Image (cartoon, rainbow, N blue to C red):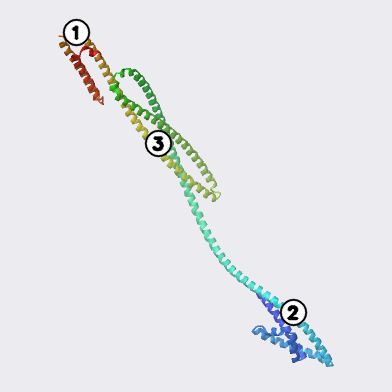
Amino acid sequence: MLQQAETDCESRENEDAQEVEDYISKSRKLVGKEYCTQELREETPGREETRIDPPDGQQDSENEKNKEKTLGKEVLLLMQALNTLATPEEKLAALCKKYADLLEESRNVQRQMKMLQKKQAQVVKEKVHLQSEHSKAILARSKLESLCRELQRHNKTLKEENMQQAREEEERRKEATVHFQITLNEIQAQLEQHGVHNAKLRQENIELGEKLKKLVEQYALREEHMDKVFKHKELQQQLVDAKLQQTTQLIKEAEEKHQREKDFLLKEATESRHKCEQMKQQEAQLKQQLSLYMDKFEEFQTTMAKSNELFTTFRQEMEKMTKKIKKLEKEIVVWRTKWENNNKALLQMAEEKTIKDKEYKGFQIKLERLEKLCRALQTERNELNEKVEILKEQVSSREADVDLATPVLQSCTLNSHEKLEISINKEQEGIQPDIETRVANEGSEKTVNLVSIPTTDFVD
């Protein structure tokens, strides 16, 4: 389009220039060289400009040749027309008319030239603009062609990659389904094992609870019995408070420790029950989640043939489910360790309780022995008081019988010492030696006092 516009503009310019030059040559030949040159310089100022700016090389030579040919033909025609006229005045009038017509035509041509020059400038600008756009379009076209080629190559590579990915995804999907089925079977087996283990744990917890109840009942009965015994023996122990303060303090401390241990065991039993209930709830939740996952897996098997997009979502759900299962397995391991630790603690507490019960029984045996000793001492004291009264009566009547009463008293004291030694040998875990020595010393002092002190001092 641009080349055609350029050629049209050049052809129009050449035609206009040729017409102007033809008219000028005709006028010059008709009027004369000098007259025509003067008139042309005065009235046609644009002619010099047209001659100053000739067209290029070969076109100029061709235009000049064409102009000469046309001028020669027109001159011949004018000469023939003038020869037809008779007088020179008519010839001048005809030439003047022709000259006036040529002036008007030249002015019109100049106007047209100016208009055409403006149009030419606009066309040149449009030409430059169109050339720039054409160059841009060519560059864009080349870029588009290169991009199209790259896109075709990229599309081919993408198709090949998509085919490979589709094959790989199908293989992965098959492997994932097989792996998931295996994991589900393993999870079911583990759940069955956990169910059996939990049932055993329930039975053991129930048995432990029953044992604890029995122990608490037995302990309550023992406490009631002990309260009755202590109330019954408080009157008897008032005589021996000074000697048995240490033993009573030890018994109180043992009772406090036993009470604390009892409270601690009860708390641990309640906590173990709560934990067992929580484990049951977690087991139910896990079963519900497993049933939900089984339902989801069945739905996935039905919908997997419809679209590959659902396969990606299912794989994400699978990953989430595996993470949850791992978390649940970790929690199960943690709870199992906690339960084992609690069982160990319960066993330790039971062993400690048995030890404390043994210690308590030892204290009871010691108390019974002390009570027997106290009773024996009381009986001996009563017997000694009776003998002292008899001796008082005998001393008052017979002073000589005092020598006979002393060996009897010594034999009584020896018997009491032998009984004390036998009781001390039977005790293995510690009645304090101070008590025994005090009892022996008191018995010996009594025997000595019976001999040396007057009769009024033995009333105590």
Where does residue 213 sit, x and y in percent of width and height?
40, 26
Q: Nearer the viewer, residue 351 or 264?
A: 264
Residue at the image position 68 percent from the left and 74 percent from the top: 122
Q: Is residue 24 left or right of residue 391?
A: right
Q: Amino acid at mark 3?
A: Trp
Q: Nearer the viewer, residue 406 or 356?
A: 406
Q: Earlier in the sequence, mark 1 or mark 2?
A: 2
> Among all residues in the image, which is located at the extreme top?
397
Q: Amino acid at mark 1?
A: Ser
Give the residue pinned by disc 1: 396
Where does residue 368 sit, x and y in percent of width and height?
29, 20
The image shows residue 420, relative to residue 171, as above or below, that is above
> Among all residues in the image, which is located at the extreme bottom?
87
- Circle 2 or circle 3, nearest the eye: 2
Where does residue 71 sit, x and y in percent of width and height?
74, 88
Residue 380 position by quadrant = top left
Residue at the image position 54 percent from the left and 50 percent from the top: 309
Give the residue pinned by disc 2: 111
Q: Which mark is residue 339?
A: 3
Give the class, few, some or many, for how many residues have Cα within 10 Å of label 1's Cα (few <14, many ≥20): few
Q: CA distance from mark 2 to mark 3?
A: 115 Å
- Circle 1 or circle 2, nearest the eye: 1
Which corner quadrant holds the C terminus?
top left
Q: CA distance from mark 1 to mark 2?
A: 191 Å
Report whether residue 343 is seen. yes
Q: Which mark is residue 56?
A: none
